[in-house]
Image (cartoon, helix red, strand yellow):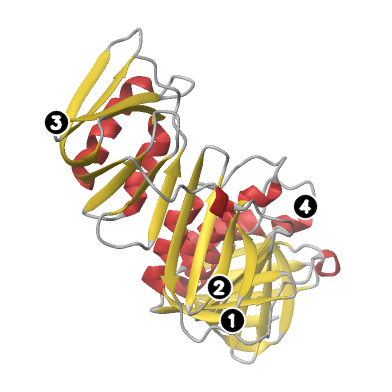
Amino acid sequence: MKLICDGLDLADAVNVVSRAANGRTVNPILEGIKLTATDGKLTLSATDLEIYVSKTIRADVKVNGTIIVPGKLFSEYARKTDKNQISITSEGDTVIIKHGDSVCNFQTLMLAEYPDIVSLNAKPHFGISANDFKDFISKSTISASSDDSRPVLKGVLCEIAKGEITGIALDGFRLSKVTKQIANHGGDISVIIPARALEEVKKLIVDEEVSVVIANKFFQVNLGSATFASRLIEGEFINYKQIIPTAFESSVVVEKAAFEQSVERAGLLVRGDKINLVTLKVADKKIGITSNNEIGKIAEKVDASLTGKDMAISFNARYLFDALRASGSDFVKVEFNTEISPCVITSAKTGDYLFLILPVRFSS
């Protein structure tokens, strides 16, 4: 291999693919980054066998070739160059990197041991705007579980039908549901995408529209010169429709920013506690937000519009704050039945998302 490329382009590509180079693996080869030079381009790829990332940049390729470089060392060195033209040459098991008057060389890894990088050549299953996909990910993944004992709950159930994609995630204490419009979808389908994969995709999205391929038990996002792929999670998801209440005895509309800030302040006092308990008391056109422990007490009130009966109910402050922060609405609707029944948070104007939170039993 022998090529010359732009230092800024190389540093950007390294930042993208190094997300998949696993420095904590017991298999050293997965720490590597694959460089493939051919036909005026350099493609960098990395995988930890769960996610696969590649990015292509322009290069003046003198000699085609493929090598595996130590991911951490190569990434850090590429980020610290002077960003001028960089020459990369491989000779045997050594790679030589030159920029300006500087020269660096180090050993490459065994190409034969590196796993194949997934690339789905199937037709995209749907397209979605970049902003909508970022919002879809932000709203859905907050409720995904981190418990390895139930792998399906570490993912987001994605139901694609009738020109929409609906994402559902739950961890046994809360549930997220979000729906977005999609374009050119290739038929109804239901798959479970790892929440971690979606979060990584969100960091890479920059284009106006995202193209998504679902095939061969994989999920792939095409992002211009970058490609991201992940294995789908196999298994049967929980019947979430049985969990979401369809009628409520109390409904409150409140300004989201004021409510979120009060919940965040109340949560400061209890964030080290086991259940981070905050209590909401809805009455007299106000929501009271309180928290207390042996250190002290915080009590605030926020203006609200109540339909139905007064309510006192307690929640884990972090779950409540996460839902409000992700909502993105100016005003939210918070709906209750009893102090031991789930509460549901939606937009006061649109119906594109829903957060459900289980309460902590309230005692007066």
Residues packed near mark 1 inside 10 Å, few (<14), some (14 to 19) or many (20 plus)? many
Q: In the picture shown, does residue 166 fall above or below 287?
A: below
Q: Earlier in the sequence, mark 2 or mark 1?
A: 1
Element assignment for label 1: loop
Percent of width and height locating residue 152:
67, 51
Residues packed near mark 3 inside 10 Å, few (<14), some (14 to 19) or many (20 plus)? few
* Residue assigned mark 2: 160
CA gap between label 2 and label 4 equals 38 Å
- Horizontal side, residue 152 vs residue 289: left or right: right
Contact between marks 2 and 1 (CB within 8 A): the answer is: yes
Element assignment for label 2: strand
Q: Amino acid at mark 1?
A: His
Q: Can residue 33 be seen in the rendering of this structure? A: yes
* Residue assigned mark 1: 125
Identify which residue, 310 or 142, lies in the foreground: 310
Q: Earlier in the sequence, mark 2 or mark 4?
A: 4
* Residue assigned mark 4: 28
Give the foreground label among 2 and 4: 2
